[in-house]
Amino acid sequence: MRELSLFSGIGGGLIASRILGWNTVCSVEINPFCRQILQCRQDDGLLENFRRHLDEALVLEQLADLAA
């Protein structure tokens, strides 16, 4: 299953999704501290690499591309 994570926080839900075998294709988080934690978790290998965005309009555009 593919997942778009909105309001991702520090990634607790993303970690659970990974345990369930879901594939996160994109993550949106506005808080700079939370984005930093997400980046650290990807760098450490706790989360797989996926796109991270602040601009919701860009996310919707890229989702349309993914769905095509």
Image: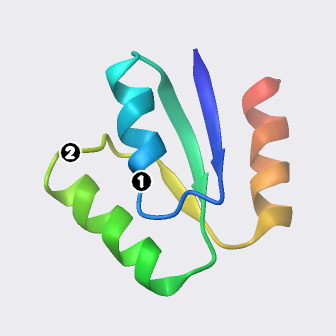
Identity, as a three-letter code, of the amino acid under mark 1: Gly
How is the rendered protein coloured?
rainbow
Give the residue number, with chain letter if any, for mark 1. Answer: 11
- Residue at 27%, 54% in the rendered image: 42
Image x and y of residue 57, in percent: 86, 64
Give the residue number, with chain letter if any, for mark 2. Answer: 46
In terms of secondary structure, where does tag 2 sit?
loop
The number of numbered discs placed on residues in the rendered structure image is 2
Residue 29 located left or right of residue 63:
left
Earlier sequence position, callout 2 versus callout 1: 1
Q: Nearer the viewer, residue 13 or 59?
A: 13
Image x and y of residue 10, in percent: 41, 63
Q: Quadrant of the N terminus?
A: top right
- Residue at 78%, 62% in the rendered image: 58
- Do residues under tags 2 and 1 come within 8 Å of each other at their CB atoms? yes
In terms of secondary structure, where does tag 1 sit?
loop
